[in-house]
Amino acid sequence: MSTSHPIIKSVNSAGEIAELFDSIETTKSTAILRMADYYMEQTTGIPNNTLSNIVVK
Amino acid sequence: MIPDELLSKYQIGTWNSLDFFDRWLFQSNFPKISAHFISDNIFQLEQNRFLSADMYDLDLYPPETNPFNYIWYIPITCRFGNDSTKFNFTQTFFLDQQIMNISFNNLYFEYFYCNTDFYGYYIMDYTNENWESLSEALDNNNIDLIDIDRSNLLNNAFMGTQTIEESYLIVRGVTQYLYRDIYTGLLSWQTLSYHVNRMLDVLEYESLYSVVQVKEKKLLLFKIYIFFLNRNISNLLLEIIIEPMKFIYGMIMEHFQNSKKQKKNHFFMKFLF
């Protein structure tokens, strides 16, 4: 639980920025993007009209 | 970061994607979704924060500190069926409140599976009866449960054991198919190895305090397999080690089934050590 935190969190110093970049920032964010991507495509019915494209651009 | 103006143009179901992302990015943890039929044709989904048994006393983010009170916007696709070899109905739900009841009118289903293709970032909480049906479906090689779904169920079962509600009996149920000849997939083995490795780490730590008696040979053998399964090895090598792995896991299951009563959280300890 000590490593649990929201993906977006306020920080008070530069040191805290480095602390924030852990597996939650990477793996959890990726999993959420994958979920959003899939259901966005399901909603619009348009393939590739997805967040991945936005992020890449 | 993706700008809000851009994000707000996108939709997920009926939700603006900005609202969707706020709930996932500003809240810690992730949801556990309980799903069951409250009557023959009313299907209920209920979301709660997933908490492992040891997290209740050490909560760094209690609900009052959370902007959305641990309610997420959850898209969820479920498959329903009456026959263990296939599903015959699929539906997507958009859960944005704690409890949602869905009427199925004159449709009736024996069992279901949610979070298809493992697209959702959440854990499912099924009733014991539904877990039994899912185990049977896995065992009967249900054609709609592809490799990633099998891994999803296995992962879900292991995660469930970390809560206070579910036991390793469910893990036993959803892993039985692994040592059947008919099953040739590899992904589930990798998922299994990940979770078993985590358990072994805990058990080794406990052994320092003489909580368990380590029988070195079995532990070593199992750890060698786990070591390989956790590496990015070629499919060919993986296929070679799968057969002995099936054999040893079959022995484990047999031993487990012969034990009359198992204490929760000591599943592997009973026959490995």
Image (cartoon, rainbow, N blue to C red):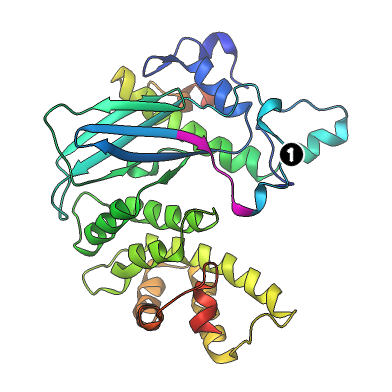
Residue B196 percent across, percent down from the top left = 52, 68
Q: Residue at image x 31%, y 25%?
A: A42
Q: Residue at image x 51%, y 27%?
A: B72
Residue B111 against residue B28 in the figure, above or below: below
Residue B20 percent across, percent down from the top left = 50, 21
User: Is B52 inside the magenta-drawn segment?
Assistant: yes
Q: Which residues are magenta?
A: B47-53
Looking at the rendered structure, the secondary structure element under dot 1 is: loop
Quadrant for residue B88, please give it: top left
Query: Looking at this view, is B78 or B148 the one in front?
Result: B78
Dot 1, how many residues are within 10 Å of its Cα: few (below 14), some (14-19), or many (20+)? some
Query: Looking at this view, is B131 or B6 the one in front?
Result: B131
Query: Looking at this view, is B205 or A46 the one in front?
Result: B205
Left/right placement of residue A46 relative to residue A7 reads: left
Q: Residue at image x 86%, y 27%?
A: A12
Label 1 belongs to which residue?
B60
Disc 1 marks a residue whose amino acid type is Leu
Residue extending farthest front: B39
